[in-house]
Image (cartoon, rainbow, N blue to C red):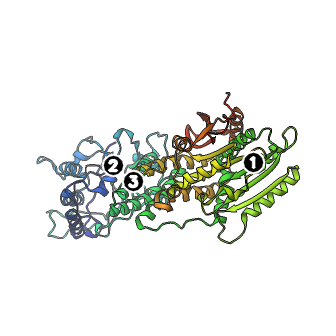
Amino acid sequence: MKRDNNHLQPNPDPSSSLGGGTSAGKAKLWVEEAAQQDCGMDELLAVLGYKVKTSDMAEVAQKLEQLEEVMCNVQDDGIPHLASETVHFNPSDLSTWLQSMLSEFNPPSSFDPFGAAGTAAEAAVDDSFLGGPAESSTLSTLDFENNNRQHQKSGQQIFEEASCSDYDLKAIPGKAIYSQNTQTQPQTHDSSSSSTHNIVKPEKRLKSTSGSHSDIFPPPPAGAGGASYGIPTDSIRPVVLVDSQENGIRLVHALMACAEAVQQNNLNLAEALVKQIGFLAISQAGAMRKVATYFAEALARRIYRLYPQNPLDHSLSDVLHMHFYETCPYLKFAHFTANQAILEAFEGKKRVHVIDFSMNQGMQWPALMQALALRPGGPPAFRLTGIGPPSHDNSDHLQEVGWKLAQLAETIHVEFEYRGFVANSLADLDASMLDLRPTEVEAVAVNSVFELHKLLARPGAIDKVFSVVEQMRPEIVTIVEQEANHNGPVFLDRFTEALHYYSTLFDSLEGSASSQDKVMSEVYLGKQICNVVACEGVDRVERHESLTQWRNRFVSAGFSPVLLGSNAFKQASMLLALFAGGDGYGVEENNGCLMLGWHNRPLITTSAWKPANNTSPTSTITY
C-alpha cells in the first residue's frame, strides 16, 4: 500500500483536533492513569493489541500531540517525501510508530516546504494491531480513479475493490491518515501562530461511516477533542479493510483474557474487558456472535454477582427442551440408542419395568412402546416409573404425561402401568419407594438422559444414586451425558472447555430449518452456559464430565459395561441420514459406547451398564 498526503490541510479550529487545550487534557488523563498502573504493559491496551508500557503513557500522549500539530500545520504538496498512499493504522508499538511518523514529518534542511511535490516514497505498514501474527492478517485498500477525485458523492461512496479476498471484509474503525479534496472558506492563523505565513486551512472533517463497525468500539473519551473512530464516507483516500475472521480472533482473545482476569479476581480489568467483548461481538455474524453474547452475559453475571435464578420454571424448561429436541438430532440420538439397548435387554421378558430419571415430557417412550408392540409373540406388560422435578404452579405434569402415554398404549394394545414421582433430586430416591418386584417376575431398566451430572454438585449424591440403582438389580442402565469436562476445579480450564464445546454446538444449530426452534434451542443452551460460567457451589449444576470420567465412576461403583450392539449403531446412522442428510454430524463407537459429534468433535455419549454381580453383558458389537 502507498501513502499520499497531497491534500492534508491544517485546521485552525482547536476544538476539532487533538492539539491545543484538549490534547493537554488527554495528556493529563494518561499521566494520571500511568501513575495508577505498575511499570509493566498497560493491560487494557495489551488485550487490544497495543504494546504501551504504563510508564510511557505520558510520552506517547505527548508524541500524539506533536504528530497532530505537525499534521495540522502542513500545506498541500508540502511534504514530498511522504507523497505516497501508505495508510498507517493501529500499530501495536505506539511509541516506536509515533517516533517514526514524527521523523518523516520533519523534513530535511534542504527541503523547500513551498516547492513542487517530490517523488513517492514507500513506507511499511504495521498491521499487528490485531494481536496475532502478521501473516494472519488479510488487508486490502480501496481507491478511486484519478478522474473521480474532483467529484463529491452524495450518499454512500462507491468503492472499487483493489484486491480479492475470500473473506467478508469490513472497514476497521479508527483514525487513519487521509486527505480530503473538499473546498472550504479560507481561514487565517492568528499572528501568534508558529508559522510566519498565513496558511489557508479547510476545516477537518471526521465522520463516522454507516455500518456495523461503528458499534464495535466505544465512543472516544470526552477529553479527546473532536477525534472520531469512524472513517469518513466522503473521503477519496484509501480505506483500510480487514476480514471478519481477524475480528473473531480478537473476540476470542478478549473472552479468554476476561476469564483469566475473573480467575485472578481482577474485577476492574474483567469489567472493562466484558464491555469490550460486547462491542466486538456485534461485528460477528452467525454462531460466533451468539456464543460470545451468552458467554459475555455469563461473565458479567459472575463479575457483578447477578446470579441467575435457579431452578428454571418447569414449564419454561419443558418448552425449551422440546424445541431443542426438534431443532437438532442430539436428543433423538439419545432416545434411539438408549431405546435400542433397552429393547435388546428386554428380549424374551414377559413383564418389563423402565425407571426413567429424566421423564420431562416422556418423548422417549412412544417409540419403545411401538417397538414392543411389534415384538414377535406379542408385547410384554410395560410398566413405567417417571421421575421429575416439582412444578412451580403445583400442576401434576408427570401425571399428565402418564395419561397421554396410557392413551397410546391402549391404541397399540400394550398392557401399560404408570407411576410418577416428584423429587427435587435423584439423591432423594429410595429403592423401597419404587414398588420393585422380583427379577424373576419383572425385568428392570434404568434410564437417565442429561441428569447424572447434576448430582455432582452435592457431595455424596452420585454415590447414593449408584447404591439405589444397584438395589434395583436392573438388566441394564442406559446413560446419556454431554461429552465435555465442565467440572474441573480451575475456572479458566472450565471456561476454555465450555467455549469450545458450546461454539461447536451453536455451529451445528445454524442449519436448522425452523428459525423459532433454533432461537429457543439457543436459549436452552445459553442457560447452560450461564450456569457453567456464572455459578459456583451447589448452584452450579451443569457439571458435565467426559466418557472416561463416567466410566471410572461406574466401575468404581461396581458396574460393568454393556456393549451397545450393531443395531444401535445402525439406528443412530439411519437417524442422522434422515436428519438434514446428516451433513456435519457423525456417529463414533468408543469401547462399546456411541458418540454423536459435529465435524469430528464428540458432543454427547450413550453408554450402558449393569451391576457387576449380574450376568455377562447382554450384547456385543459386530460391525
Q: Nearer the viewer, mark 3 or mark 1?
A: 1
Q: Earlier in the sequence, mark 1 or mark 2?
A: 2
Q: What residue appears at the point 24 percent right and 49 percent down from the top-left corner?
A: 97
Q: Name the residue tied to disc 1.
A: 438
Circle 2: element type:
helix
Q: Nearer the viewer, mark 3 or mark 2?
A: 3
* Label 2 crowd bin: few (<14), some (14–19), many (20+), radius 10 Å: many
Left or right: where 72 falls relative to 500: left
Residue type highlighted by circle 3:
Ala
Locate residue 605: give its quadrant.
top right
Q: Nearer the viewer, residue 332 or 35?
A: 332
x, y (%) of residue 239?
Answer: 39, 50
Q: Earlier in the sequence, mark 3 or mark 2?
A: 2
Q: Name the residue tied to disc 2.
A: 129
Q: Name the residue tied to disc 3.
A: 254
Residue type highlighted by circle 1:
Pro
x, y (%) of residue 374?
Answer: 85, 41
